[in-house]
């Protein structure tokens, strides 16, 4: 087993970095050492694990299959190491979390600050990605848990539990000069006559608002990667934007944009803590969740855990 670990560590590092030199730097070994480990593993398994191109190193079909097993196996081993560190009171260890821009900024960040104040020795990594990507990272073993937002359309969540931790509201904002900013009880039909900006289609926010608007609603005029950009574009008079209210709160308060008064409000949705039901969790992750759940509004959690 001691011979296998360096090979699989090298395999996972090359797969993640798509570069032998970058993997060697990560593992703090030489490039020939990494190449030797990969060649030995390929020889032992009787398959090619990587395709080498001018643009980098990529997994073959066989490599993709092995990666899923190796990633989960390494996660189990690292969880065991973290369990040993538990005895030293979290003086060392690692915490891996997945979160979108929205869940990180308006929920997770304050809890990371609290955790860091108590456990300075723990290394924290946050994988910043939309909810669907965070769920995939969770299922692959790349993170300990995720902070995600509804909806979970198209995600394989059969082995995941979700605990609600915060309620959020989706709204529409406009520049003060927009005619709709002076209207009350605006209908979807009225809204459809204007240029609407939204997040990209791979986000849970876009899917949720698009579902509420309906299939016949016109496609967005502008698609942007972040909610901050949506607020900025609206401030410049570049259309009406769909955003989570937290992102626009300051701009609304300062009068740079106006929250539209919709006749029918978009139903609120929630942030959730997501974790694999049958995967052992590191001690650092469990301590972090304890910190989070100590401050969660119990009214939001009412109804209990949601099973995928």
Image: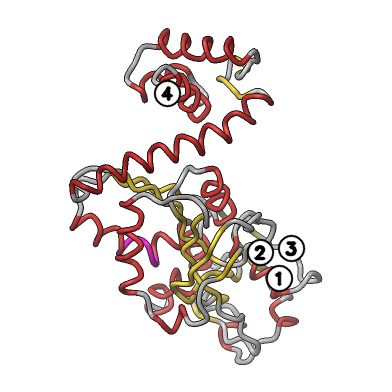
Label 4: which residue?
A: 5
Question: Which residue, as the protein is rendered here, is positioned at the far front?
Answer: 1
First-in-chain label (4 vs 3)? 4
Question: Which image quadrant for residue 186?
Answer: bottom right
> Residue 114 in the image: x percent, y percent?
24, 62
Foreground pick, 96 / 203:
96
Element under disc 2: helix
* Percent position of residue 38, x then y: 51, 14
Instruction: Judge whether residue 179 can be spotted in this image.
Output: no
Specify start and end residues of the magenta stretch as a single range: 106-110
Q: Are marks 2 and 4 in contact (CB under 8 Å)?
A: no
Residue placed under numbered mark 1 in the picture: 211
**Mark 4–mark 1 distance (CA, rounded to whole Å):** 47 Å
In this rendering, is residue 84 above or below 70?
below
Across and down, in percent, residue 135 comes to: 56, 53
Q: Which corner quadrant holds the N terminus? A: top left
Residue contact between numbered discs 3 and 1, judged by CB atoms under 8 Å: no
Q: CA distance from mark 2 to mark 1?
A: 6 Å
């Amino acid at each position: 087993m001691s011979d296998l670990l360096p090979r699989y560590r090298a395999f996972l590092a090359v797969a993640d970095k798509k570069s032998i030199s970058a993997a060697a730097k990560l593992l703090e070994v030489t490039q020939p050492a990494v190449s030797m480990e990969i060649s030995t593993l390929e020889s032992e398994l009787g398959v090619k694990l990587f395709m080498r191109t001018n643009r980098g190193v990529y997994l073959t079909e066989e490599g993709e299959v092995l990666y899923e097993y190796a990633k989960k196996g390494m996660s189990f081993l690292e969880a065991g190491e973290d369990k040993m560190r538990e005895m030293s009171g979290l003086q060392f260890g690692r915490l891996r979390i997945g979160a979108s821009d929205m869940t990180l900024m308006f929920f997770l960040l304050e809890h990371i600050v609290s955790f860091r104040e108590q456990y300075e020795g723990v290394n924290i990594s946050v994988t910043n990605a939309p909810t669907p990507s965070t769920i995939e990272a969770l299922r692959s073993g790349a993170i300990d848990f995720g902070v995600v937002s509804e909806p979970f359309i198209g995600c394989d969540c059969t082995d995941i539990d979700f605990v609600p931790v915060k309620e959020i509201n989706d709204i529409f904002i406009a520049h003060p000069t927009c005619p709709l900013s002076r209207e009350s009880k605006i209908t979807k039909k009225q809204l459809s006559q204007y240029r609407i900006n939204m997040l990209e289609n791979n986000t849970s926010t876009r899917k949720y608002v698009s579902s509420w608007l309906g299939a016949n609603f016109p496609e967005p005029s502008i698609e942007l990667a972040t909610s901050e950009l949506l607020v900025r574009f609206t401030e410049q008079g570049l259309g009406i934007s769909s955003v989570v209210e937290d992102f626009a709160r300051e701009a609304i308060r300062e009068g740079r944009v106006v929250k539209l008064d919709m006749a029918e409000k978009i139903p609120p949705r929630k942030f959730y803590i997501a974790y694999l039901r049958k995967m052992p969790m590191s001690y650092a992750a469990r301590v972090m969740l304890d910190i989070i759940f100590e401050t969660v509004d119990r009214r939001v959690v009412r109804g209990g855990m949601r099973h995928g």
